[in-house]
Image: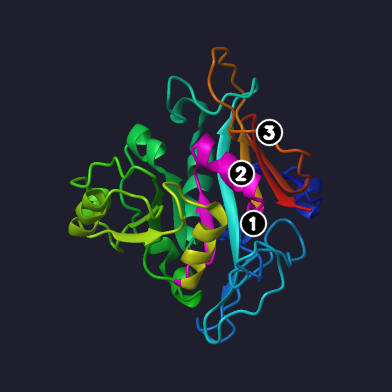
Amino acid sequence: MRRLFPVTDQTASGADREWTLDELAEAYAYPASARRDDAGGTGEVAGTGAGGAAGTGGTEIGDVAGGRGAAAPAGGCRAAWLRANMVASLDGAAHHEGRSEPLSSAADMRIFGMLRGLADAIVVGAETVRREGYRPARAREALAARRKAAGQGPAPVIAVVTASLDLDFSLPLFTAPLVPTIVLTGAAALPERVRAAEKAGAEVIVAGDGPGVEPGRAVRALADRGLVRLLTEGGPRLLGQFVAAGVLDELCLTMSPTLTSGYAQRIAGGPALAVPERFALAALLEEDGFLFTRYRRV
């Protein structure tokens, strides 16, 4: 793996080797703004990552109007940072025949695992859970000390976004996780489906006044529970909702050197923004023709 941006001594040397877990962890560290006040003193995430100086953005959890600058609850979380991790082919496909795996690589899967290992919670849409066969996140011994130092549990929480709660609650994702799975839904969710989720061991959080989930409320609800380092893996519809709501702070996009043709979705779907939102390149890595990009909201 080579670092192409930002330019460093390693870039100049043209080093191309498999990175260690510690190197990947530092390269993808959350900014210091995503922290818990009650986690290990300052609770700041070690390192500023490959993007240089730590960002000062993130979604302030006390701001119900969707803006910024609201005071944080005493002894709780300061700001949530929502990062997305997606893969796309050269012609813009987010999947091939319904799954992202054909677009991936060994290096992509290492980064996928690292991003999960750094997160407090993984936010995913119900359709992606069904299509990709989601299982509980596992604890990784190699990251145990890093997670403990950051005030995190042994594994990230999986948070499923669903309006209908049309999920198989007998799956291990709900019945056998290391930490209880969260189900984010709207106030109009069917009571019997809510009871089924809770009976399976999931925590149900209402994050919307209607049938669906409001993205900003979902982020705040997770942050209220101390889950501030957030990672979403889509799918495209959910990512599109986060983009439209203006709560996405960072995009980790793997550019796969593949062509698929066909009619696959892009990485984000839904109505177009009135004005395209600008993101700035924070880091760029390369291995075997795959480009691993990090963009942060300007």
Name the residue tied to disc 2. 17
Q: CA distance from mark 1 to mark 2?
A: 15 Å
Q: Nearer the viewer, mark 2 or mark 3?
A: 3
Can residue 103 be seen here? The reply is yes
Three-letter code for the amino acid on which mark 3 is drawn: Ala
Q: The magenta stretch spans which residues?
A: 225-249
Residue 182 image point, x, y percent: 35, 58
Q: Secondary structure at mark 3?
A: loop
Side (left or right) of 163 relative to 91: left
How many residues crowd around disc 2 within 10 Å: few (fewer than 14), some, or many (20 or more)? Answer: few
- Contact flag, marks 1 and 2 (Cβ < 8 Å): no
Three-letter code for the amino acid on which mark 2 is drawn: Arg
| Res. 42 mark | none
Q: Secondary structure at mark 2?
A: loop
Q: CA distance from mark 2 to mark 3?
A: 40 Å
Depth order, front residue of 9/191: 191
Residue lying at 56% horizontally and 82% vertically, measured from the top left: 73
Residue 150 falls within the magenta-colored stretch: no
How many residues crowd around disc 3 within 10 Å: few (fewer than 14), some, or many (20 or more)? Answer: few
Q: Nearer the viewer, mark 3 or mark 1?
A: 3
Residue lying at 33% horizontally and 49% vertically, measured from the top left: 189
Residue 158 image-quadrant placement: bottom left
Residue 244 falls within the magenta-colored stretch: yes
Residue 42 image point, x, y percent: 59, 84
